[in-house]
Image (cartoon, rainbow, N blue to C red):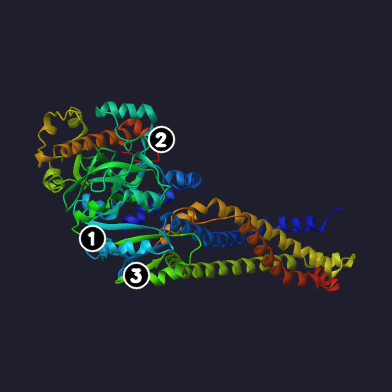
């Protein structure tokens, strides 16, 4: 009920923007539906309650690099990630879904997921963040691997809790070389090194994107209708 | 000289808010009507296109399992029934058959999809015959399997997008622990093929321990043949049942007919409400101009002139309301389509709301006819106003 009322409130407060978006969607028609695939929670109501037990509601925002800053932003994100966006599906127009989490009317954090190419299929990595950008939860929604059970295990995810983008800045997503807290993350399935590295790359990408979309001051000022601190 | 049309138009402008609200009522009714009729023809067209895209007209499958795909999804492949591949040779000999296509659908449980796991489906086909069946399929990358027994996969566009695969990448079949090399990625088709992973038929039969077994045989008929006659013959084959895609279409159309009747009922109610609104607006207008009409009559206006004047007002309201409603339906057709897809258990790909010139003309004619009917009573009442009574009522005031 709380979730519903919050959604309704959000809808009414943004009715003008909503109307413009609705018109845009109508005019765009299928174009939007044929765009790149994003990464959503399978069952947001259930998953948000599970990942953020104290939450009473959430808002969903869709952000993409091309709308937010275009090619210059993509270049900046790639520099911060330390790797180019690869593959025909890791593109500038991917719509990223940001779940803004609330306890009553107070914002308490975010949930954000990214798709990442794994050894045998796409991996969907979600991080649960507090308002300072610190990881307070880690969830791999989907992974195809012989060792997926180990990498998706809660014990593996717990190693990420408390880490921030700063901890990942020194992690080289290409060579897999790490230092500090990221180096301390143990691979629960040494046989699946590629998937382990993919999970770390996805986490770093996730944190860089959230920093650009949400936490940096320019992200807040350029996105008045979107998530703000 | 001022025309009756101009007089009627100016009369409507006297009470702008009331006229506007009546217009909104008519426009909403017209919107519902156009959207409903557009859905009626759009759904059928899209369904026909979907069925045509399948490439065959008849399907043969094991008896007792007409909804094999649903069974597969619900039971993770364990509920599927199989037919012998040898049946296909018998079918291919029939003179009505142009080509028969073997298919094997299989599914495995993937515990690492979401919180409680999910089903991963695979479609075993013969590359050569399947390419003949669907000549419109184009590859974004790569091509069909290199060998009938190869551990290779061709992925539909959306399947590849979700799994982040490109040619040369590997995919793993959970549960069976078998790896496949992706050799082709199809271009987007807008059909169920987009989400499908195709593997060689022989390979899939081997993996699932079902050599020489199939779940479905697709039959493409020669042009102009009697499909009913062939169906009769196929029913004589042991333990199989025949599903005609025309039957499938009829069943789906019957299923949605209930929904259509309900929406049509709502549309009729909306139209009735709009009619009452029009009658109310024009009657109020006649009542307010009681004296004015009396004066018009004293200076020579005939009952027919007054009748026409009031009728034209109705006509103007309905014409403008109808145009607005049609415009609204056209602009919001995509939104209507999204809503339909949300509520319907099955919706074919492609446009579900098809609004064409014929439909617009029919709707406008219907709205104008309803409007003219609604205007009859107020116009008749206005035509019967007696001049002396009208003027006396003025004096009495």
Q: Which residue is mark 1?
A: B76
Q: Secondary structure at mark 3?
A: strand
Q: Nearer the viewer, residue B24 or B123?
A: B123
B326 vs B232: above or below: above
Q: CA distance from mark 2 to mark 3?
A: 53 Å
Question: Of tags 1 and 3, which is closer to the observer?
Answer: 3
Q: CA distance from mark 1 to mark 3?
A: 22 Å
Q: CA distance from mark 2 to mark 1?
A: 41 Å
Residue drawn at x 16%, y 50% is B177
- Label 2 in the same subunit as label 3: no
Q: Picture coordinates of residue A65 (x, y %)?
A: 36, 34
What label does residue B241 carry, if any? 3
Q: Picture coordinates of residue B269 (x, y %)?
A: 56, 69
Question: Of tags 2 and 1, which is closer to the observer?
Answer: 1
Q: Nearer the viewer, residue B286 or A215?
A: A215
Q: Secondary structure at mark 2?
A: helix
Q: Which residue is mark 2?
A: A67
Indicate the quadrant where residue B383 lies. bottom right
């Amino acid at each position: 009920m709380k979730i519903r009322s919050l959604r309704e409130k959000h809808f009414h407060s943004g009715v003008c923007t909503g109307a413009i978006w609705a018109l845009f969607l109508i005019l765009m028609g299928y174009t939007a539906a044929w765009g790149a695939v994003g990464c959503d929670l399978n069952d947001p109501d259930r998953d948000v309650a599970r990942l953020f037990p104290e939450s009473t509601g959430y808002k969903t925002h869709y952000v993409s690099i091309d709308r937010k800053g275009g090619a210059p932003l993509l270049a900046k994100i790639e520099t911060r990630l330390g790797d180019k966006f690869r593959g025909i599906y890791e593109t500038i127009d991917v719509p990223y879904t940001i779940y803004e989490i609330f306890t009553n009317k107070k914002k308490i954090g975010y949930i954000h997921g990214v798709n990442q190419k794994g050894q045998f299929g796409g991996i969907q990595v979600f991080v649960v963040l507090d308002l300072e950008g610190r990881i307070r939860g880690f969830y791999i929604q989907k992974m195809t691997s012989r060792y997926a059970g180990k990498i998706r295990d809660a014990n593996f995810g717990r190693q990420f809790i408390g880490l921030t983008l700063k901890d990942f800045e020194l992690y080289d997503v290409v060579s897999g070389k790490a230092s500090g807290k990221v180096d301390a993350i143990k691979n629960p399935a040494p046989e699946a090194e590629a998937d382990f590295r993919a999970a770390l790359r996805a986490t770093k990408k996730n944190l860089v994107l959230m920093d650009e979309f949400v936490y940096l001051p320019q992200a807040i000022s350029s996105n008045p209708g979107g998530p703000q601190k | 000289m001022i025309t009756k049309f101009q007089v009627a138009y100016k009369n409507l402008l006297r009470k702008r808010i009331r006229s506007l609200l009546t217009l909104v009522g008519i426009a909403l009714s017209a919107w519902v009507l156009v959207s409903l009729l557009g859905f009626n023809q759009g759904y059928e067209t899209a369904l026909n296109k979907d069925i045509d895209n399948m490439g065959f007209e008849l399907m043969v499958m094991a008896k007792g399992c007409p909804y094999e795909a649903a069974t597969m999804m619900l039971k993770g492949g364990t509920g599927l029934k199989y037919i012998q591949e040898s049946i296909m040779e018998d079918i291919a000999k029939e003179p009505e058959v142009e080509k028969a296509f073997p298919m094997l659908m299989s599914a495995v449980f993937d515990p690492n999809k979401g919180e409680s796991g999910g089903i991963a489906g695979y479609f075993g086909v013969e590359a050569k015959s399947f390419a003949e069946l669907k000549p419109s399929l184009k590859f974004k990358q790569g091509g069909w399997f290199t060998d009938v027994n190869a551990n290779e996969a061709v992925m539909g566009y959306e399947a590849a997008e979700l799994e982040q695969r490109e040619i040369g990448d590997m995919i793993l079949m959970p549960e069976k622990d078998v790896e496949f090399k992706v050799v082709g990625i199809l271009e987007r088709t807008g059909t169920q093929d987009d989400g499908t992973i195709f593997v060689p038929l022989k390979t899939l039969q081997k993996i699932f321990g079902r050599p020489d077994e199939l779940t479905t045989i697709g039959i493409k008929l020669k042009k102009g043949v009697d499909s009913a006659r062939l169906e009769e013959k196929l029913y004589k084959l042991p333990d199989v049942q025949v599903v005609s895609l025309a039957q499938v279409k009829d069943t789906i159309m019957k299923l949605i007919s209930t929904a259509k009747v309900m929406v049509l009922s709502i549309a009729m109610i909306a139209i009735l409400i709009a009619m009452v609104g029009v009658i109310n607006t024009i009657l109020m207008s006649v009542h307010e101009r009681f004296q004015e009409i009396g004066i018009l009559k004293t200076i020579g206006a005939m009952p027919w002139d007054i009748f026409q004047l009031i009728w034209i007002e109705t006509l103007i309201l309905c014409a403008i309301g109808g145009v607005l409603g049609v415009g609204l339906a056209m602009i919001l057709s995509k939104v209507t389509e999204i809503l339909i897809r949300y509520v319907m258990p099955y919706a074919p790909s492609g446009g579900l709301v098809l609004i064409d010139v014929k439909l617009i003309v029919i709707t406008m004619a219907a709205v104008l006819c309803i409007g003219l009917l609604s205007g009859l009573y107020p116009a008749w009442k206005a035509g019967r106003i007696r001049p002396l009574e009208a003027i006396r009522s003025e004096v009495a005031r």
